[in-house]
Image: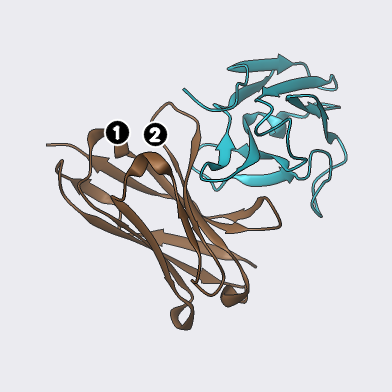
Chain colours: A brown, B cyan
Amino acid sequence: EVQLVESGGGLVQPGGSLRLSCEASGITFSNYWMAWVRQAPGKGLEWVANIKSDGSAKNHMDSLKGRFSISRDNAKNSLYLQMSNLRAEDTAVYYCVRHGYYNFDYWGQGTLVTVSS
Amino acid sequence: QSALTQPPSASGSPGQSVTISCTGTSSDVGAYNYVSWYQHHPGKAPKFMIYEVSKRPSGVPDRFSGSKSGNTASLTVSGLQAEDEADYYCSSFAGGHIQWVFGGGTKLTVL
């Protein structure tokens, strides 16, 4: 059974930083592209970033303007999202997602990030 | 505002059919046959329901079907069941720097 378990969310002040983690099990993690997708309260889903299976290629949402960085450690079956200079509009549930072929085939349950003073 | 436009709500009685639309542009939905749909029961992990416009992953009932015409994709749920009540999101590959776009979601209510 594929399991993606996110952690690291919480309350952070504007301008602060946070690192999200996602531990994968039930898959050969190193074979797959992975992604982060977020959902702000009352809003739709929003793609944040993705990373190639070996970590050699990454894509981030343009509007993040370099504040977020996706990475992975295949030896630990783990995906990460380093978030800095956080803003209120970054408040969302962040989902760890496995890329299928041009789709997102497995999702974690998400971790809530709240940016507030 | 989401990149893809979905109606905020849809409803139907058990056994009926409901269709949810997903409108994008010639740069995403219209350009690629990489439209997918996701079912989300709040508090749970979203579930992958349709890929490449109309294909169903293993385990998804054939009551769920997808189609596309121009810049608009659609998800049809036939033979509505109580457990189909959920939020549904569409997504499309958009290429370039944008990569992936999602819809704002449609809350499906089974009356």
In the picture provided, is A100 more to the left or to the right than A29? right
Tell me if I can see residue B111 in this picture.
no
Residue pictured at 70% horizontal, 16% vertical: B11
The label shown at residue A89 is 1
Identify residue for label 2: A40
Amino acid bearing label 1: Glu
Residue pictured at 62% horizontal, 16% vertical: B7
Which quadrant of the figure has residue A78?
Answer: bottom left
Residue pictured at 50% horizontal, 65% vertical: A57
Which percent across, then down, holds residue A81? 36, 59
Label 2: element kind: loop
Residue pictured at 17% horizontal, 37% vertical: A116
Q: Which quadrant would the C terminus of chain A be assigned to in this image? A: top left
Amino acid bearing label 2: Ala
Which percent across, then down, holds residue B90? 65, 34
In the picture provided, is B68 more to the left or to the right than B44? right
Of callouts 2 and 1, the N-terminal one: 2
Q: Look at the picture and state if A69 lies above or below A85.
A: below
CA separation in Å, label 2 and label 1: 8 Å
